[in-house]
Amino acid sequence: MFPLFKRALMPLVFVLPTVLYASDYTYQQTTQITGGSLLKMMKTVGVFSSQAQHMGDPIVSTIYLKDNRLADVSPERIQIIDLDKETITQIDVEKKTYSVMTFAQMKQAIANARERMQKEAAKQQPQRAASSDPNAQDVQMSFDVKVRKTGAQKDIGGLNSSEAILTMTMTATDAKTQQSGNLAMTNDLWMVPAVPGYEQVREFYMKFGAKMGDATVGLGRDFSRMLAQQPGANQAMGDMVKEMQKIDGVPVMQVMRMGTTVNGQPLPAASEAPLPTEPAGPSKGDIAKAGMGSMISSRLGGFGGFGKKKQNTPPPDQNADQAGAQPTSAILMEMQTTTSNFSSAPVDPSHFDVPSGYKQVQSAMEKQEAQQ
């Protein structure tokens, strides 16, 4: 799950100002899911599943950059991007397997997915028009992207950082009923003016983005497919690029939230509305008594009517005050990424090699394409 959200932050790197800088470079990123209804649900499941139980554990990745190659190395997985060969290699350390996709293959797979989604949407349009089902919907999407500097400052790892908040709100409106729901993402960015040598990291991602030729690819394939069929998506990405031009520097900490809001309002940033301390999870006995399905359902909550009719009961909210105010947002996931240990020391080329004895397999994207 983490690689998807790390890729979701790529556009933030793509659009920051950059200059050429030629040298080896290394840094570390610590990523951790810190809250939200999804984490609550996984903790519940974690009573029975050790994998789910560790979902909230921090994952430390080391990023190695040498010339036109970048390796993102974590204990379980390794991703290697080679700009010269135009390949992305995914290595599963636990299974001792690896897969390789070219940029061209990945772009074609994304294009095929978009075409399928658009054809499916076109097929459903006359069916919706002829349907007598009052719940049949023609959902339209709109996007709003904003960046604002708050003026707040914080010491992070001995570096004096300043805060900028990126908000993106997607509103789904039923054309028949005018009912709407909102899905929102907020990224709380703590920036430092500069880190020696980090310019080449931005330059690498700028080159990667240019070669892929698709601003949405950094958001992950599934999210890219969703955006592809929406008329306002390209404008949204263009707005994001424009808004990000307001930010200078290097993000040393990011707190990303995804969730739902009412009336198209942005999701509050972590610094504006910290999550409350979570109570201890239920025991196996509690789950057995309540029933696994009902407990997970109650803990996960809804998506605030996203693409559906609004419900009379609002979604659960971590941000409602104790006076009983109506909820204004519900957080599905909060994830924190801290960047540290920057180094310009020489990088060992072996970090970009597939370990000896690993077996090559078909990539997950290729498997999905073959099933279509």
Image (spheres, helix red, strand yellow):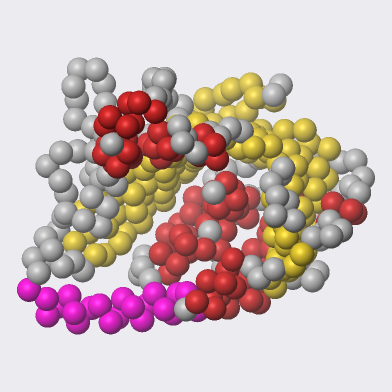
Where 351 falls versus 357 (above or below)? above
**Any magenta on residue 128?**
yes
Does residue 211 appear anywhere in the picture? no
In this picture, which residue range is highlighted in magenta? 110-132
* Rendered residue at 84%/56% (across/down): 355
Residue 342 image position (x, y, % from top left): 78, 36
* Rendered residue at 73%/60% (across/down): 97
Q: Quadrant of residue 36?
A: top left
Which residue appears farthest toward the top when viewing the image? 323
Residue 163 image position (x, y, % from top left): 54, 31
Residue 32 image position (x, y, % from top left): 57, 35
Residue 126 image position (x, y, % from top left): 19, 82
In the rendered picture of this protein, how many numbered marks are placed on residues?
0
Q: Report the predominant secondary structure element of the magenta stretch.
A: helix
Q: Quadrant of residue 213?
A: bottom right
**Any magenta on residue 63?**
no
Q: Nearer the viewer, residue 360 or 236?
A: 360
Q: Nearer the viewer, residue 126 or 167?
A: 126
Q: Is residue 22 left or right of residue 326?
A: right
Q: Nearer the viewer, residue 279 or 206?
A: 279
Q: Quadrant of residue 290?
A: top left
Q: Nearer the viewer, residue 334 or 216?
A: 334
Does residue 214 appear anywhere in the picture? yes
* Rendered residue at 84%/51% (across/down): 351
Q: Is residue 252 left or right of residue 183?
A: right
* Rendered residue at 46%/27% (across/down): 271
